[in-house]
Image: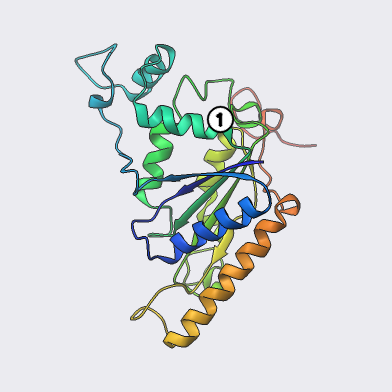
Amino acid sequence: MNVLIVYCHPEKKSFNHSLKEVAVNTLEEAGHIVEVSDLYGEDFDPLERAEHYQSRIVVDKFDPLSEQRNAYETNTLPSEVKREIERLKRCDLLILQFPLWWHQQPAMLKGWFDRVFVGGGLYTSKMRYDTGYFKGKQAICSVTSGAPKETFTKRGRGGGDINTLLHSLHFSLHYMGFDVLRPYLFTEVQGAGFTYKSEHELVESLQIHRVNWKKHLKRMGSMGRLSFPGWGDWDERGVEKIMT
């Protein structure tokens, strides 16, 4: 199996970085081919801008979707976007490794979605959801938070159930055709000044997280999948059909 890890964290000494390393080592030991897209390390530009497109079809205003479509059709996409698309094409499994910042993915990762999932190329009006470009591939979010696990409930201090917090991200992956696996949440991972744990307790709990993540990766074939509606569940307006 070919695995792509899209890693989004600015610090090499971070817990997120160590989780990325655990995933690389565990999956390679199991015989899989692993590739890493290090968004901060490779200085990926998350901002969609007119300057990215050298052969503009409209010069007096910037229409990102039109420029994306044209660049895809004329093979003039920015080199870093081409690189990410090729990585996605090669993978069978996509792992998104990131921290929860303000109850969502970091802006860098959102920008990766904005620029890499090219309109008119990787999705069209008919090529999306259960007929999406990446149909047959799987994706999973590996997410860290400083909040306790018990707070990730509907009215808890964590802001909601993790599936609720990640719904828009998960739905975007579904939109692109991925089978979306249940996310893996690591809680209480903050360092000194942001945790009630002693330094020893924190180090110990982080190591337990790493061990559990390794075990989870080894059970990759049995991971649960999230359920989303497809074309057959909507009427011609895109409204959910009323089942009788």
Q: Is residue 160 above or below residue 172?
A: below
Count neighbours of disc 1 (C-alpha within 10 A) and say few if under 14, some if 14 to 19, many if 20 or more: few
**Number of numbered tags placed on the structure image:** 1
Q: Position of residue 154 (x, y in %)?
A: 55, 65
Q: Position of residue 132 (x, y in %)?
A: 60, 28
Q: Is residue 66 above or below residue 160?
A: above
Q: Is residue 121 above or below residue 14?
A: above
Q: In which quarter of the view is residue 80 placed? A: top left
In this view of the protein, which residue sits in the foreground, 58 or 156?
Answer: 58
* Residue at screen point 38% across, 52% down: 106
Q: In which quarter of the view is residue 83 placed? A: top left
Residue 197 makes an appearance in the image: no
* Residue at screen point 34% across, 60% down: 11
Circle 1 sits on which residue? 89
Q: Is residue 135 left or right of residue 39?
A: right
Residue type indicated by callout 1: Lys
Q: Is residue 176 left or right of residue 218?
A: left
Check the picture and name the quadrant holding the N terminus.
Answer: top right
Mark 1 secondary-structure assignment? helix
